Image: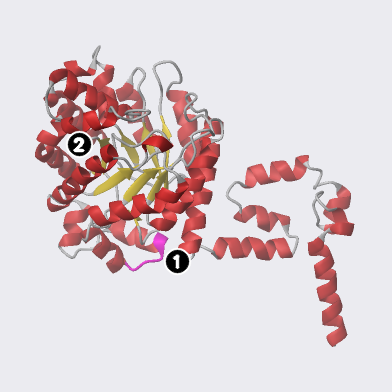
Amino acid sequence: MSTQLYQAKQGNITEQMKRVATDERLTPETVRDEIAAGKMIIPANVNHPLGKPIAIGRKASCKINANIGTSPLASGTNEEFEKLDVAIKYGADAVMDLSTGDDLDAIREAIIARSTAPVGTVPIYEAAQHIDTIEEMPAEELLRLIEKQSRQGVDFITVHCGLLKEHVPLASKRLTGIVSRGGALMARWMMMRDEENPLYTNYDELLKICRKHDMGLSLGDGLRPGSLADASDDAQFAELEVLADLTRRAQAADVQVMVEGPGHIPFNEVRMNIEKQIELCDGAPFYVLGPIVTDIAAGYDHIASAIGGTMAAFSGASMLCYVTPKEHLGLPTAEDVREGVIAHKIAAHAADVALGKPGARERDDRLSKARAALDWDAQFAEMLDPERAREYYTKAGSADPEATEHGVCSMCGPKFCAVKNHNDIKQCVLTSRK
């Protein structure tokens, strides 16, 4: 089976490349060349017909991923359907099913069938679910599960291939140790069995599986920092150097690949982290969790993450993994998903505008034009969350007859409304010129 990367290397332009070129306002040739260079990917498993293929890369608009999924303690298929629908409705470009509860196959297959966006997973979660402790898992079992998920239509998988046994002692020096679920499971497997990472030693077999159905690799950062104190340490960057080598090996095998990044990072270190990955990984797309720029924002971590995400995207990150208000506290609800998606859409969009991505500011300008005209319906049409805006507008009393008559909101009312006063002044100036 030929992959998007293989086709691009051959100089061919696929239908997926044409579609994302239109969406991104790029030429199909630019998309093809970026994919051929390993700087852009289109995660699109041949077994999962997508409503909208997406391009992840620095020349494309910054994308948003939303994590959903059950836990052993909460949620089920219906709840995850609701989260999936909410995520896509409010602008998530991709979703990851991180389910760790029961009936993982059924939930995954149902989400893939329902999702019009690319779907990612972390296969080691399923491996851990079927046994008492992860060290019982034979290496070939993890590869078998990855092969199964590839056939099911998973578009990209997070695999912690770059976390080696020699890295684990480095993480033991940390304040918060290993905070990645997949990374901690892999580290436990290695240390309890005194063996090297099975996905590292069997990496060529993994690449064969991915190439078969064009399933993308998201090289997970199992040693991402979970606190500001651990940011940018030896453990994090030792893993990143291995990921850089694995990135090149994947690209040589015609497998589409992106690299995952931190984590908790002080704001002043975000740009350095992005630039380091771009340099080491030859510009491969960088997919970051946040970064969360403070450790004390529990309940508001979607805001702390969006602040870091804006800087990350501006510095060259290609996709932001959202964080919800429930981060560090519990399994997100559908409303938490909505909050997380919107916060990170703001972050990505702000970076796209600042970077001058094609067409990025047009929506802002249309809204501003409507705002200047006190045209509320036109304003709502351009907002990231029109329903929330209308809700606030109505509850604030802005839709009462007096306000509606003048087109103003209840913040200032007709007498103090700067926009209304300016429009009256403008009319006066125009009249005096006649």
| Amino acid of disc 2 | Cys
| Amino acid of disc 1 | Pro
Q: Report whether residue 212 is seen.
A: yes
Residue at 37 percent across and 56 percent down: it is 316
Q: Position of residue 396 (x, y in %)?
A: 78, 42
Residue at 50 percent across and 50 percent down: it is 347
302 magenta-colored = no
Is label 2 in a helix, a strand or a loop?
loop
Is label 1 in a helix, a strand or a loop?
loop
Q: Position of residue 349 (x, y in %)?
A: 50, 55
Residue projecting furthest to the bottom: 434
Classify 10 Å Cα crowding around label 2: few (below 14), some (14-19), many (20 and above). Answer: many
How far is disc 2 from disc 1 in space, using C-alphas? 35 Å
Residue hosting label 2: 161
Q: How is the image coloured?
A: secondary structure
- The answer to which quarter of the image holds residue 139 is top left
Q: Earlier in the sequence, mark 2 or mark 1?
A: 2
Q: Report whether residue 116 is seen.
A: no
Magenta region, residue range: 23-27
Q: Is residue 75 left or right of residue 428?
A: left
Q: Position of residue 78 (x, y in %)?
A: 46, 24
Callout count: 2
Q: Is residue 415 left or right of residue 47?
A: right
Residue hosting label 1: 358
* 410 is higher (above) or lower (below) than 30: above
234, 319: nearer the viewer: 234
* 197 is higher (above) or lower (below) than 234: above
